[in-house]
Amino acid sequence: MAARFSTIDDYIDSFPEEVRDVLRQVRRTILAAAPAQAGQSISYGIPTITLDGRYLVYFAGWKHHVSVYPVPDGDAAFEEVVAPYRAAKGTLRFPLREPVPYDVITLVTGVLVAQRSASGG
């Protein structure tokens, strides 16, 4: 049975140290790009950054990669930036054997925040 976590810290602490460092930086990156009132929780068993009580960005650690969900639709320039990391329509996968492009996570979070604002919440 999969472990259940009550906090993002509990989730991160369940990984080996080298993965913890990456997950902590992913979390910091998302929170830096999100509005100050963004919240944090566990949803669907993974870390979730919320805005106005609704999910904004999920992230997760795996054996060989970390993932960020969802991937918003964007213009051609945005798609060009995220394409190398797209694992599925709504998932970005960053292999742990390579440096994580935190700037891409910042960009994705910013687009998600802008889309949420444009939709009125």
Image (cartoon, rainbow, N blue to C red):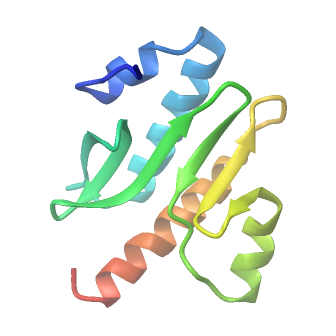
Is 52 above or below relative to 5? below
Q: Quadrant of the N terminus?
A: top left
The residue lying furthest to the front in this view is 1
| Position of residue 92 in the picture relative to residue 46 (left or right) | right
Q: Quadrant of the C terminus?
A: bottom left
- Residue 34 sits in which quadrant? bottom left
Residue depicted at 69% across the width and 78% down the height: 78
Give the total of numbered labels.
0
| Position of residue 55 in the picture relative to residue 75 (left or right) | left
Residue depicted at 25% across the width and 40% down the height: 41
Is 95 above or below relative to 2? below
Q: Is residue 96 visible?
A: yes
Percent position (x, y) of residue 12?
A: 44, 22
Q: Is residue 100 visible?
A: no
- Residue 95 sits in which quadrant? top right
Percent position (x, y) of residue 84?
A: 83, 61
Percent position (x, y) of residue 29?
A: 50, 45
- Residue 114 sits in which quadrant? bottom left
Percent position (x, y) of residue 64?
A: 74, 29
Residue depicted at 58% across the width and 66% down the height: 90
Residue depicted at 68% across the width and 63% down the height: 88
Residue in the foreground of this view, choosing between 120 and 86 = 86
| Position of residue 22 in the picture relative to residue 47 (left or right) | right
The residue lying furthest to the left in this view is 53
